[in-house]
């Protein structure tokens, strides 16, 4: 049962789902947001007490329960003060877990979360299960409680894991770790340790053999996926590569519609999670054969004047951009051009430098942290905005070349989200 005095910090879709959840259970929460006009405020039911523009420390200290949205750092002084005073602070996912009776598959990682979450959800649906897919993707977790639920598949960000102490998933995975959100975490180790919290209490920990940072604590029930022949892996048979399980061929890599080694790893992780959930292999393979990827993730936009344009606006960190380049590099018949820029979130862009020297013909740089990108090499060019970047690449790319928009940065300096940024890029390309 929920306590009487509940404060919800942060509105948006997650905050609104928390308000609905409380009202349905007879509790009328107080809603706070540091923004003067938070998104979703117009959707609040009449009679909800709201405090916008700043956090009210006195109300937080008087609360029995604080539900913090993922975008609210626990290090916020008013939140930290309430926590020190003994006020319980949780997130929406924790509330979901306290009521959900279905097994949970939990997925995190710096990159690939949404792809693997979608794959596992579609595999469960293909098998006829009543599956709910949500969390950091699409539907807020609490809204999944509205329908029948035999399996919950949750994408979880590091922010969500901070406020989800009760997670004990049927299976959990950390797909990979690369620098991200270092404007919120004081080090890569801090960020990694937060991600690894997903393994706490898990029935099976699914880790990436290609990335030692994803390994669970010693003694945990675990299985790995990777590009070798072990466990969930890859073998060669009949002159072609196959996805495999314990050395047995499962599906030829050529049957996948999603390209690149990083997507082969995503498929293997999804298979391991689906096996733990009891999803039949036939359903898994049906989904792997038809799944063409998600919007804004190495998405083919158009071919203009013999040049192919790809939208990977979801590449909001360096690791994602490296994966995107690796995924397409072998298929490019000509030169590869890169568009990058936005909010760098304190990342080191250095890992891109060797690719600029060897593989990238040129990189157009825009946005808040473009100066750091420009310093990576002599084949970079500063442009005012995304339109300028598209125009610069269009002037230089020749038939057979590909242009990849994989920004390595967040979008919030110029766009409300990565989707809006990707939509703008596609519109600019279509107008060429």
Image (tube, rainbow, N blue to C red):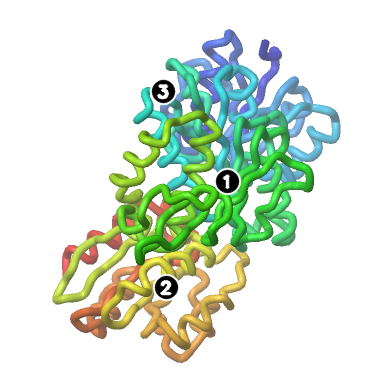
Residue 178, image quadrant: bottom right
Of 412 and 405, the residue lying toward us: 405
Establish if 203 lies above or below 327. above
- As drawn, the residue found furthest toward the right would be 85
Residue 189, image quadrant: bottom right
Residues under labels 2 and 1: Cα distance?
29 Å
Front position among marks 2 and 1: 1
Side of 103 relative to 56 (left or right): left
In percent of width and height, residue 279 lies at 45, 31
Residues under labels 2 and 3: Cα distance?
45 Å
Q: Residue at x 59, y 27 (%)?
A: 31
Establish if 350 lies above or below 178. below
Q: Which mark is residue 129?
A: 3
The residue that disc 1 covers is 108
Q: In what quadrant of the picture does the C terminus appear?
A: bottom left
In percent of width and height, residue 98 lies at 64, 20
Of 334 and 146, the residue lying toward us: 334
Side of 227 relative to 57 (left or right): left
Q: Secondary structure at mark 1?
A: strand
The answer to whether mark 2 and mark 3 are in CB contact below 8 A is no
In percent of width and height, residue 343 lies at 52, 64
The residue that disc 2 covers is 366
Nearest to N terminus: mark 2 or mark 3: 3
Q: Residue at x 55, y 34 (%)?
A: 276
Q: Secondary structure at mark 2?
A: strand
Tell me the crowding category of disc 3: few under 14, some 14 to 19, or many 20 or more residues within 10 angstroms, Cα based.
Answer: some
Residue 228 shows in this picture: yes
Side of 412 relative to 426 (left or right): right
Q: In what quadrant of the picture does the N terminus appear?
A: top right
Front position among marks 2 and 3: 3
């Amino acid at each position: 049962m929920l306590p009487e005095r509940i404060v919800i910090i942060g509105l948006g879709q997650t905050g609104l789902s928390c308000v609905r959840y409380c009202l349905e259970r007879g509790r009328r929460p107080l809603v706070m947001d540091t923004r003067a006009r938070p998104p979703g405020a117009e959707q609040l039911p009449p009679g909800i007490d709201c405090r916008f523009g700043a956090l009210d420390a006195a109300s937080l200290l008087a609360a029995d329960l604080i539900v913090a949205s993922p975008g609210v750092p626990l290090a916020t002084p008013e939140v930290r003060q309430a926590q020190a005073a003994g006020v319980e602070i949780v997130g929406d996912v924790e509330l979901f877990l306290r009521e959900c009776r279905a097994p949970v598959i939990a997925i995190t990682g710096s990159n690939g979360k949404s792809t693997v979450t979608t794959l596992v959800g579609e595999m469960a649906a293909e098998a006829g299960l009543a599956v709910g897919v949500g969390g950091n993707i699409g539907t807020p977790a609490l809204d999944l409680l509205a329908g029948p639920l035999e399996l919950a598949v949750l994408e979880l960000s590091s922010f969500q894991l901070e406020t989800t102490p009760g997670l004990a998933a049927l299976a959990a995975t950390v797909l990979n770790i690369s620098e991200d959100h270092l404007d919120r975490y004081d080090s890569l180790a801090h960020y990694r340790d937060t991600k690894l919290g997903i393994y706490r209490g898990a029935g099976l920990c699914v880790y990436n053999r290609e990335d030692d940072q994803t390994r669970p604590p010693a003694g945990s029930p675990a299985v790995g996926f990777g590009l070798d022949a072990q466990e969930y892996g890859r073998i060669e048979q009949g002159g072609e590569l196959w996805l495999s399980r314990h050395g047995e061929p499962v599906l030829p890599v050529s049957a996948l519609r999603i390209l690149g080694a990083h997507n082969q790893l995503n498929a293997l992780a999804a298979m391991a999670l689906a096996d733990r959930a009891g999803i039949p292999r036939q359903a898994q393979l049906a989904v792997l054969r038809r799944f063409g990827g998600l919007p804004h993730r190495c998405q083919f936009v158009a071919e203009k004047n013999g040049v192919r344009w790809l939208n990977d606006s979801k590449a909001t960190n360096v690791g994602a951009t490296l994966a995107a380049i690796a995924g397409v590099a072998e298929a490019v018949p000509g030169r590869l051009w890169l568009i990058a820029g936005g909010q760098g979130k304190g990342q080191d862009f250095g890992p891109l430098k060797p690719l600029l020297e060897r593989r990238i013909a040129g990189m157009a740089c825009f946005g808040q942290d473009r100066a750091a990108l420009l310093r990576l090499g002599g084949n970079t060019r500063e442009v005012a905005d995304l339109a300028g970047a598209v125009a610069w690449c269009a002037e230089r790319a020749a038939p057979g070349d590909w242009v990849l928009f994989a920004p390595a940065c967040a979008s919030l300096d110029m766009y409300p989200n990565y989707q809006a940024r990707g939509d703008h890029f596609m519109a600019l390309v279509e107008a060429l």
